Image: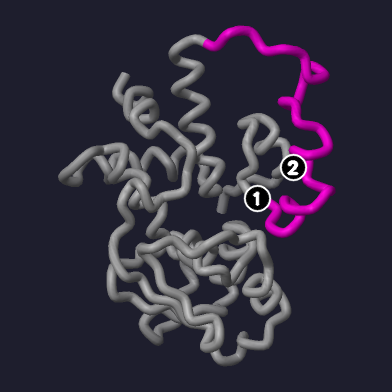
Amino acid sequence: MARYTEAACKLCRREQTKMFLKGIRCVSDKCAMERRNVPPGGFGKRRPKMSEYAVQLREKQHAKREYGLLEKQFRNYYKLAVKQKGITGENLLRLLETRLDNVVYRLGFANSRREARQLIRHGHFRVNDRKVNIPSAQVKPGDSITVADKSRKMTRITFALDSSARGEVPGWLEVDPDNMAGRVLDAPTRDQIDLAVQEQLIVELYSK
């Protein structure tokens, strides 16, 4: 399976925003954005003014890297979003937000989406009391996500629940930390998706 294996901190520096790809490290003084807040390459020299295409590309790259996807995966989500009713850009973000790895991260069971994917692949979570080890599985309103009984004392999960890296749980999700369980209350709306990208620019890029 293809996956990104290079330095994750370079991605944050390139997009000039914290994407919390390294979990708790991103809220410490070891964060690359705090230590060297310049784009990689060229020794941090000033970048020239970007063209319209470059601006659209940066928005796409930001969203793709935020959710930890490769180009083919991201494009496939765009194709699904085009086929759905409604605004294509919002459909795209909704599909990305309702991936199981993102939901596990948003609920606070992992400090990063990368960590959430690894935990899911190792079978540490249940969806509606059934084992699911596919990070890209889509959840829907009414689904319950729980930590497997054998995994409830895992240090990584308990540490994530106590960590401040995850931020607040969005309104379309509900979490019960004591029982290590969460529920999808509704499909997320655009104002409930905490992602600073202009999704319309992504649509314009792929529409060319």
- Above or below, 186 against 64 in this view is below
Q: Residue at x 31, y 37 (%)?
A: 89
Q: Position of residue 55 (x, y in %)?
A: 49, 19
Whether residue 37 is in magenta: the answer is yes
**Quadrant of the snapshot with the C terminus:** top left
Residues in magenta, as a range: 21-50
The answer to whether residue 147 of the structure is visible from this angle is: no
Q: Amino acid at mark 1?
A: Leu
Q: Residue at x 27, y 43 (%)?
A: 81
Q: CA distance from mark 2 to mark 1?
A: 10 Å
Please tell me which of labels 2 and 1 falls first in the chain: 2
In the current view of this chain or complex, which residue is farthest to the bottom?
149
Image position of 66 (left or right of 172): right
- Comparing marks 2 and 1, which lies closer to the viewer? 1
Whether residue 175 is in magenta: the answer is no
Q: Which residue position is annotated with label 1?
A: 21
Q: Which residue position is annotated with label 2?
A: 7
Q: Residue at x 37, y 23 (%)?
A: 205
Q: Position of residue 182 (x, y in %)?
A: 44, 77
